[in-house]
Amino acid sequence: MKKFIKILSVMLIVVGLIGCSGGKPKNVSDDVYDLGINALDTTKSFLDGNTTQKEAYTKIETIASRFPKKDKTMEESKIENAVLAIQIILFGSAKADVDKVREAYNTLKERLNK
């Protein structure tokens, strides 16, 4: 009986953890989430060598300009700030520091529960 309860407890914990990961974060509109996903895709394309730094910067700049100007939740502001960090790194020099881009990419990924 004890063994059954332990197994059941472990299964409930695993199911609970699986259910909590991924998906759109709470208090984030579909529009802001989609902008974040587009920024992730653009950044990944740059990191994979499929997009030039200039192309990635231009796309990220367009994405960043589409964020709402006011009435954002804290979570939406964090996503926007992560996108802006990528934009700044890509703009900062003739050759972007790939490690910094990757770090900003991972931060955005976390903000989007990806």
Image (cartoon, rainbow, N blue to C red):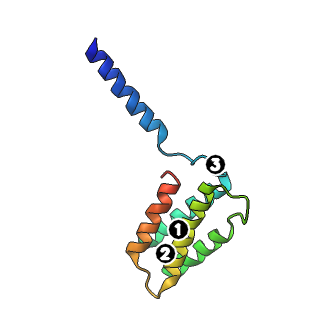
Three-letter amino acid code at the position of disc 2: Thr
Q: Can you say which quadrant of the picture contains the N terminus?
A: top left
**Badge 2 density bin: few <14, some 14–19, many ≥20, Cα 10 Å:** some
- In this rendering, the answer to whether 51 lies above or below 111 is below
Left or right for 41, reference 73: left
Q: Residue at x 49, y 68 (%)?
A: 43
Tags 1 and 2 touching, CB below 8 Å: yes
Residue 101 picture quarter: bottom left
Label 1 and label 2: CA atoms lie apart by 8 Å
Give coordinates of residue 97: x percent, y percent: 40, 79
Q: Residue pushed farthest bottom?
A: 94
Give coordinates of residue 83: x percent, y percent: 56, 67
Residue located beneath label 3 in the image: 27
Residue 42's disc number: 1
Q: Who comes first in sequence, dot 3 or dot 2?
A: 3
Q: Residue at x 27, y 15 (%)?
A: 2
Q: Who comes first in sequence, dot 1 or dot 3?
A: 3
Give coordinates of residue 92: x percent, y percent: 50, 84
Label 3 and label 2: CA atoms lie apart by 32 Å
Q: Residue at x 63, y 70 (%)?
A: 64
Three-letter amino acid code at the position of disc 3: Asn
Q: Residue pushed farthest top?
A: 1
Residue located beneath label 2 in the image: 51
| Secondary structure beneath label 1 | helix
